[in-house]
Amino acid sequence: MMAKATLKERQDKRFINKETQTAAKYLRRLEELSGAPDDIEPFYNALKRIYVDMKSVETENKTIGTYCVMTPPELIYAAGAVPVKLCSGNYTAFSIGDDIAPRDACPLVKAIAGFKQTGLMPVYEDCSMMVIPITCDCKKKIAGMLADKFNTVTLHIPAKRDDIDIEMFTDQLYDLMEKLEDVTGNAVTYESLSEGFRKVGYAQYELSEFIRLKKQMPYLIRGSHAMAILNAASYMPADVWGKALHKVNKSLEKNIAEKKTVTSKKLPRILLTGSPIVFPNIKIPLLIEEMGGIVAGDETCMGERGMWDPAVITDNSFDGMMRALANRSLRPCPCPTFADNSQRIYRLKQLIKENRIQGVIYHVLRGCLVYDFEYKRIEEELGKLDIPVIRLESDYNEEDIEQLRIRIEAFIELIKLKQAPERITTVRKSF
Ligand code: SF4
Ligand code: SF4
């Protein structure tokens, strides 16, 4: 006779079913969206591996969890490990974390709390260490929660980026290096750190090519597909991701030569910015594109911003490389965690110009105060350029989808009214 499943076993089974179904549904929606570039499958497979098959990252090396782009991946590779971004967009884990974290905490950290509680996600459970830069109160408190169970390291993120702040951050990176060495048993040497730079630099080069191609011809790729490719970078070693992106770049080059686009219509070109858009919580880019817009650019940490800035080495010594990592982590980062973030405005204006943007969607995850704080200033600045902008608040569930759909549709209609209809080139079929 079969033994009766315990309450915990039944709860775990329910969690796994819901989690995998949601991830599979969003992958399906991506696949159903027309115009995906050739060779996108490795990126879908990476997302499927983590969230549908519930496996860990494909590597023989130890994995180190990171919770912000300000953790330098070069240092983790130098210690012989693989970084995995663990900021989560998971609705099922969020629903569990909702009972653990305070009501006004953001859904991203509630989902992390949910995963910790269930202990069911290999990508979290298999991490040898987790690195948590303290960028907001939510990150500070989740760092404390995670420390009950995992080997964690926190990085203090300063409010300013003066020379003294960079000095102190460099010291923290040296401490992190020692902890990585303890965990992996590998010494970080001049050669291994150079190799870490090479690995990440290769992926950054392919990303810069991808962005260059996107800018070269409007409507070459849909933003939802681009965001899937960029989200998958969290769960693939940098060299593997870079090689897969190289193939996509080649197919995009071919499409440019053949003047093939994803649409024959001049769709409203939207820039997405604000709180991170983490798979499977990709409802906003999908809604924009399902409602007849196109996400022509993004300024989000799981998107183009995530790996954009290369470290610049001005002094070839080991210390010079560590300083380059500290500089790159803090100075160019447009995260609203910094007191003065005027460079974000500059970056947004640059993206608007380069991508011929007609409207900006400013995404705020419920409870994400740092992003919400900056909205007013950005609205004012974009108003001076006559660029319409809307603030969309969302949570990790599907209850707000209808409301989001109505607001996105109205925004797209507003942009359409401002533009004359125009037909462009050959349309690519769905792949
Ligand atoms: S939004 Fe800020 S805190 Fe979040 S990953 Fe980006 S840089 Fe880090
Ligand atoms: S920056 Fe915003 S989304 Fe990220 S952890 Fe903090 S409150 Fe959450």
Image (cartoon, rainbow, N blue to C red):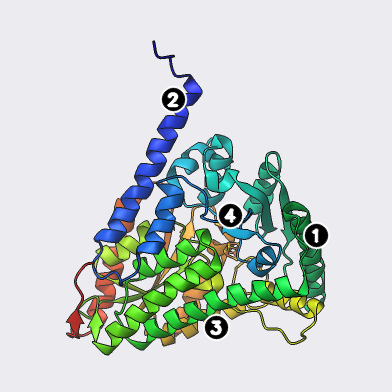
The mark tally for this picture is: 4
Residue type (three-letter) at the residue carrying disc 3 = Tyr
Where residue 292 sits, quadrant-wise, is bottom left
Report the image quarter containing ligand 1.
bottom right
Which mark's residue is nearer the viewer, 4 or 2? 4
| 296 shown above or below 301 | below
Q: Which mark is residue 346?
A: 3
Q: Give the mark nearest the N terminus, 3 or 1.
A: 1
According to the image, label 1 marks what residue?
Answer: 178
The CA distance from mark 3 to mark 1 is 37 Å
Separation of disc 4 and disc 3 at Cα? 41 Å
- Measure the alpha-carbon separation of dots 4 and 2: 32 Å
Q: What's the mark number on residue 298?
A: none
In the image, is residue 187 above or below residue 205? above
Position in image of residue 161 (x %, y %)? 73, 75
Mark 1, other Cα within 10 Å: few <14 / some 14–19 / many ≥20: some
From this viewpoint, is residue 280 visible?
no
- Using the numbered discs, state the Cα–Cα distance from disc 2 to disc 3 in whole angstroms: 51 Å
Secondary element at image label 4:
loop
Relative depth, front residue between 99 and 246: 246
Q: Is residue 74 left or right of residue 386?
A: right
Location of the N terminus by quadrant is top left
The x, y position of residue 298, in whole percent, is 44, 72
- Residue identified by numbered label 4: 60
Which residue is at a point 48% across and 19% down the rendered structure image? 6
Dot 1 or dot 2: first in sequence order is 2
Mark 2 surroundings: few (<14), some (14-19) or many (≥20) residues within 10 A: few
Residue that badge 2 annotates: 10
Amino acid type, callout 4: Glu
Is the C-beta separation of discs 2 and 3 under 8 Å?
no
